[in-house]
Image (spheres, grey):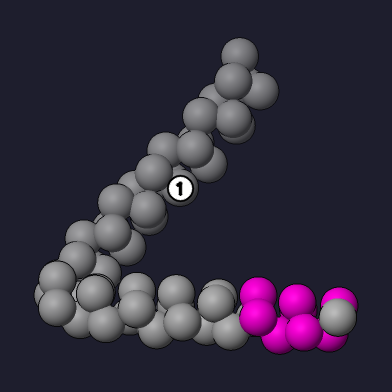
């Protein structure tokens, strides 16, 4: 019984924190900003892959 409560509480706390963080992020980042951040992220991943392939050659 106590173990079940100990397992449920962190999960619900994590869910609450996740939903709050998601709401905060969606409010802070408009779709235009999100697209720009996503583009930068894709560019960085692409650069990392290219550099790794170059070092393998």
Span colored in magenta: 49-56
Label 1 element class: helix
**Residue 36 as seen in the image, left or right of residue 7:** left
Residue at screen point 14% across, 78% down:
32
Q: Split into 4 quadrants, where in the image is the N terminus? A: top right
Q: How many marks?
A: 1
Q: Quadrant of residue 22?
A: bottom left
Q: Nearer the viewer, residue 11 or 56?
A: 56
The x, y position of residue 40, in whole percent, is 39, 84
- Can I make out residue 54 in this image? yes
Q: Is residue 50 above or below residue 14?
A: below
Residue at screen point 21% across, 60% down:
23
The x, y position of residue 14, in whole percent, is 45, 47
What secondary structure is the stretch in magenta mostly built from? helix
Q: Nearer the viewer, residue 42 or 8?
A: 42
The x, y position of residue 5, in whole percent, is 55, 25
Residue at screen point 65% across, 75% down:
49
Residue at screen point 34% across, 74% down:
38
- Can I make out residue 28 in this image? no
């Amino acid at each position: 019984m106590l173990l079940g409560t100990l397992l449920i509480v962190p999960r619900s706390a994590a869910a609450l924190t996740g939903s709050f963080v998601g709401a905060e992020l969606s409010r802070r980042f408009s779709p235009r900003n999100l697209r720009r951040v996503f583009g930068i992220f894709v560019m960085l991943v692409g650069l990392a892959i290219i550099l790794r392939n170059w070092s393998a050659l």
